Image: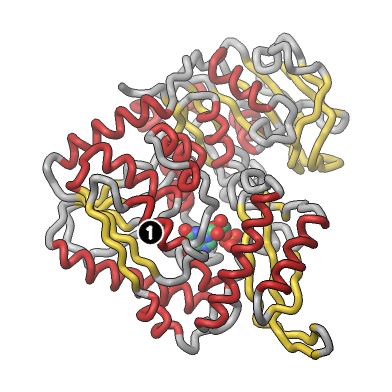
Amino acid sequence: MTNENVLVLDFGGQYNQLIARRVRECNVYCEVKPFNKISVEEIKKLLPKGIIFTGGPQSVYGENAPSVDRELFELGFPILGICYGSQLMAYTLGGEVSTCLTSEYGKTKTYYDKDCVLFSNADIKEQAVSWMSHTDYISKLPDGFECVAHTDNCPVAAMANKDKKLYAVQFHPEVNHTEHGLCMLDSFLKDVCECTGDWNMENYAEKAIEDIRQKVGDGKVLLALSGGVDSSVLAALLSKAVGNQLTCIFVDHGFMRKNEGDEVEAAFKDWDINFVRVNAKDRFMDKLRGVSDPETKRKTIGEEFIRVFEAEAKKIGKVDFLAQGTIYPDVIESGAGDAATIKSHHNVGGLPDYVDFKEIIEPLRMLFKDETRKLGQELGLSDTLVWRQPFPGPGLAIRIVGEITDEKLEILQDADWIFREEIARAGLDRDINQYFAVLTNNRSVGVMGDFRTYDYTLALRAVETTDFMTAEFSRISYDVLSTCSSRIVNEVKNINRVVYDITTKPPATIEWE
Ligand code: XMP
């Protein structure tokens, strides 16, 4: 079965992935392609049901501003331009774009034309809030277009050429702050592009299992299992597809959270697969002695991981396929090309030529995180694995600021355990996307009983985010924070001060290292 396909043409906007996720939420399959990596000829062959232009940081008049071939508008594909994409549509088709007298940023009262198919759904009010983020605007409509939304400062907040199925919105319907934005996208997809919405995880699981069987035949598959959502879902999918032709190697580097290594082992060891756990903490600790620089830690752990994995894989002998839990955001990000390296993520970008295998398979590479979770549920994985919060490849090693010692690791594991326990007790564990403790390298004076102490400061971090590219700190109540703090200082040795990290990303990152 081939799904209906919508093309999201990426002009470098910060919400490019979010647009694609929203389209998938409407049960329509879509793929994101950088605007300069797909030609009009290739688009013709792809035969998308519709095309969405993302926003982007440039002005259409800027030097090297992203552009598209005018021919694209003549092919009969429905197109929706968003933000920069809307200006590009106007400009390319002979309209004009100018700089706003007053830039619009944030929630903005918007007036919609209810006769336009994008806004005709009964839920959408004639006046509602949209999310704006622009300094240019469409100052003259191209021929054949009419204005279908405006704000107090922006005369063309949306334009449409119904006959040609071309639509453009200056605001961001993909962002939650735009009231009924998802409904607008759904109307474009279902009423303009005429998609039926045939994308769901039940179909996907069946098809993926079939595809894996076809590809793998009676070959051997090797998977590095971390116990994270992606590799666990992949293990479940592969075990359904090829059973004990699969070997999972779980390299326990010793930097898992308290008890986690055992939990991962318990979750997988009774499956009809070959499961190998390697306890390699000593090797990793040896390599990290004296290392306190975050990037060196990450690189050291990444390299050692490969070595341990390689040694174990060699024991199995030749495998045919190496499976990787790459998911779609990794694919989009690596396609985007010139983003600066903020941190070198281990486990993205891949395992090596060192292992003797024929081919890499990445059955999740077209799925977003929430889809991966749905697939996990579809395959019957436990809630603990499906809802596990993200955990970085290098583990607690990058949550201990400075040099790692056994003692510090134990302190952090105990404190983190209490924090997680209290968050779950407060019923917040599914609302907060990621929450953890960080052992800082800072020591300060305290008093316990009649004694002076000179101990570590522990930081608590909890964030709410949809894409992990930007994040808000979670507004956990003082009561919950206070319970965490007093339990931690009382129950964990060598911590005499607890602080809560109240920075957003950007400018901070989620992890401290
Ligand atoms: P930052 O700290 O960059 O983190 O804001 C964004 C998200 O990525 C996770 N993270 C990692 N995930 N390998 C991973 O698989 C890594 O090396 C790694 N480093 C950070 C982080 O936990 C957060 O969810």
Name the residue at 42% across, 39% down. Answer: 376
Name the residue at 71% across, 49% down. Answer: 426
- Image coordinates for residue 199, horizontal then vertical, percent: 43, 24
Vertical position of residue 275 compared to residue 234: above or below = below
Q: Which is nearer the eye, 422 or 69?
A: 422
Q: What amino acid type is highlighted by mark number 1? A: Gly
Query: How would you rate the neighbour count of disc 1 (Cα within 10 Å): few for under 14, some for 14-19, many for 20 or more?
Result: few
- Image coordinates for residue 303, horizontal then vertical, percent: 36, 73
Q: Say if residue 339 shows up in the picture.
A: no
Image quarter where the N terminus lies is top left
Vertical position of residue 370 compared to residue 482: above or below = above
Image quarter where the C terminus lies is bottom right
Name the residue at 74% across, 41% down. Answer: 134
Is residue 324 shown left or right of residue 319?
Answer: right
Vertical position of residue 382 compared to residue 478: above or below = above
Q: Which is nearer the eye, 195 or 104?
A: 195
Vertical position of residue 403 compared to residue 342: above or below = below
Is residue 353 shown left or right of residue 391?
Answer: left
- Image coordinates for residue 378, horizontal then vertical, percent: 41, 32
Residue highlighted by disc 1: 349
Determine if the C-beta at disc 1 is less than 8 A from ligand 1. no
Q: Say if residue 250 shows up in the picture.
A: yes
Q: Which is nearer the eye, 332 or 42?
A: 332
What secondary structure is marked by label 1?
loop
